[in-house]
Image (spheres, rainbow, N blue to C red):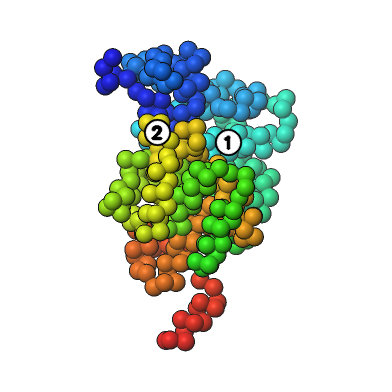
Amino acid sequence: MQQDDYLTVAEAATKLRVNPVTIQRLCRSGELDALRVGRAYRIPKAAFEAYRRGRPSAPRTVEVDRVYDAELSALIQAWQRDMEVGARPCSRDTIQTHRKHMHKYIRTLLGGEPALRITLREAVTEAALGRVMARIPVTQFATRYNVFMAVMAFSRFLVERGLMDDGDRLALKRHKPKRLLPPKRTVLHSLDEVNRFLEALWASEAHTTYEKVLNAAAVGLMVFAGLRVSEVAHLQLAHLDLAGGILFVHQGKGGKSRMVGINPRLRDMLAEYLRMRPPMGAMELLLSAKGTPLTRDYLVKRIRRIARRAGLDVSAHGLRRTFATLNANAGKSLNHIQLALGHAAISTTQAYLMADQRTAAREMQGW
């Protein structure tokens, strides 16, 4: 068996942008031809390419198919496949978000009437988008914004295929939602709060020692390196240079890559994790005890539970914001913080900073 002619489960999962568990299920069911090698699978590259070419891209939410006519259903499926393997492939999180909110858009447009069916001409119009925006409460800004972005992404797909006029697509932008209420931004304001959060993580009796070490490494990557939760989930072992103190974030948000430094505390966390990491041969850096890669949803939920036990109000994204806030309050260069976070504009970095009034007052005393 020539090694170059086969893919591992992890490699196939990365190429299809799915969880390795999904690849294992496909191999077991026979949908994807594979060889069994001990407890692992090896997938012939020719069989993998044949599966990818004929891979169905039907949405997971089946019930909404009943309200699509044949043309609209086929176009939505083609759009989803284009996001997966097209000229501008999207991340798994973006595909899932667009798919979920496109279905939300259709359901809201129909007003909850399952007996109705809707065509392409009725679904993607300025009037239709206006009706949907009027039906989603203004307090639900995230939902309104994600629905709008899903419709805009689908409309771009239609324009590229000559199924929609570019002027009609531009007209949709009139309904871009505006935030009426200030966003809730959570953060840990000091290293004392960071330590309190980590103490709650280590004090958990519901998790094994390995799970605690794993969770600490994930939290450290957000608090001490400023990574997004999705970037933490998708990190690969090859992207870590622990001896050199460098971490390479490959194709983060917007497909941009960057390098970040590893401080001594994060280096200790990662070194402890690597000593206990399961020898599964997977490409992902962070693995569960069973050897499966962590997901974004797992990390979000786990961080929420740890924060609750610690009596702190912080989200997964709040840990990334903590990185920016603590380093800015410590006098670190805003330009360096911007590069570490991967922001294109420094104004975005400034919006992350959550300096409290006491910190500002202490700084002003020395002006």
Q: Residue at x 62, y 25 (%)?
A: 62
In the picture, the disc for residue 266 is none
Which one is nearer the viewer's eye here, 170 or 16? 16
| Crowd band around label 2 with a 10 angstrom C-alpha radius: few (<14), some (14–19), many (20+) | few
Image coords of residue 323 (percent x, y): 45, 61
Which one is nearer the viewer's eye here, 58 or 209? 209
Q: CA distance from mark 1 to mark 2?
A: 35 Å
Q: Is residue 224 in view?
A: yes
| Crowd band around label 1 with a 10 angstrom C-alpha radius: few (<14), some (14–19), many (20+) | some
Q: Looking at the image, tell me whether mark 1 or mark 2 is earlier in sequence order.
A: 1
Image coords of residue 116 (percent x, y): 70, 26
Horizontal placement of 298 versus 250: left or right? right
Q: Residue at x 53, y 67 (%)?
A: 192
Quadrant of res 113: top right
Identity, as a three-letter code, of the amino acid under mark 2: Pro
Image coords of residue 239 (percent x, y): 32, 43
Q: Is residue 89 in view?
A: no
Identity, as a three-letter code, of the amino acid under mark 1: Lys
Q: Residue at x 41, y 48 (%)?
A: 272
Residue under circle 2?
A: 279
**Disc 1 versus disc 2: nearer the observer:** 2
In the picture, the disc for residue 100 is 1
